[in-house]
Amino acid sequence: MFEKAIETALQFTRPLHTITRSYGGLIMPGSSTLFFVNNHGMAITCKHVAQLIPGAENINKTYNNFREERNKLLKDGKFKRSLQGLEIKYKYHKESSIQLKNNFINCFDKIEQITVHTHPELDLAILVFKGFNEIKYQSHAKFIKTSSHIKQGKYLCRLGFPFPEYSNFKHDQDKDDIEWTQTGQASSPAFPIDGIITRLAANAQGQPITGIEMSTPGLRGQSGGPLFDTLGNVYGMQYATRHLHLGFDIRDKEILHAGEKKKVSNFPFLHVGLCVHVDRIKEFLQLHKIDFFETED
């Protein structure tokens, strides 16, 4: 059903790989998605994804300052107490994020600058990449021209990179830094998920439609990925998942499991995906004078 559409979407949809180091030393991989709207290095993604770019700069700068102060401490009997005082000053504890590195996969040969435009209300952002010589994505999104096709029951698909299976990173203990490496698994597979449109959403009654609700969840890491039809035409962008309590609650129900009687409880939810509506995406691109493409019909 969506075989060719997924191949089309993969030409302009790319993953963002992220590694985060906690003060306790744990390195956590994460992934998210963006897709390109033209051949000039301009893409859209979620606002909460785009915020990882300035967020990384702030987190890393703070840790560099901490590290400089820590390295000036005398290695004497007062070192431990002095270090604890420094940790209190920087509000560092075991779970604190102290380093964050981003890696835009298979987008360009190099990136010198990224300009971020964030929507004032919606979870939507534009990324403008600069300083590259070679573009490594093959095509660009094509948005539907008219949104009259967006109705309940419409069968659509989303694409993203929800499972961070890459391992090409390490902690350099000598430099006290995390970095990307040339070894290990460098990629994570794209993952599509289909569904039908269940409802449309607006910020207030009588206001323009801002969101499209899907019958299946958007998976973690698919944020920023396109919502498209069987031709690969884009209808929106995945940004969140809502959890609807079904009310079919079970409390202390006795069941037979592995030859034993057990009491179980269950509070089921329906997980539905939320996507930014195509019209709001196009309006935001027009506001920032970003070229994009539409279907003929």
Image: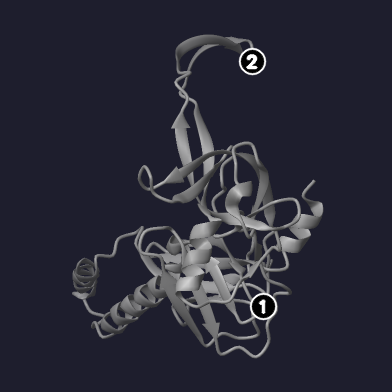
Residue 37 percent location from the top left of the image: 61, 71
Q: Residues within 10 Å of mark 1 (few under 14, many from 20)?
A: few
Q: Position of residue 228 (x, y in %)?
A: 66, 54
Figure check: 253 above or below 293: above
The image quarter in which residue 64 lies: bottom left
- Nearer the observer, 61 or 229: 229
Instruction: Classify 202 as above or below 169.
Output: above
How is this picture coloured?
Answer: one colour
Q: Nearer the viewer, mark 1 or mark 2?
A: 1
In terms of depth relative to the viewer, which is nearer, 4 or 288?
288
Residue at which label 1 appears:
182
| Quadrant housing the C terminus | bottom right
Residue drawn at point x = 23 percent, y = 79 percent = 76
Read off the residue under disc 2. Answer: 258
Mark 1 and mark 2 in contact? Answer it, CB < 8 Å. Answer: no
> At x 30% / y 61%, what residue is drawn?
93
Q: How many marks?
A: 2
Would residue 161 appear left or right of 127 to someone viewing this image? Answer: right
Specify the amino acid type for callout 2.
Ala
**Amino acid type shown at disc 1:** Gln
Secondary element under disc 2, as helix, strand or loop, is loop
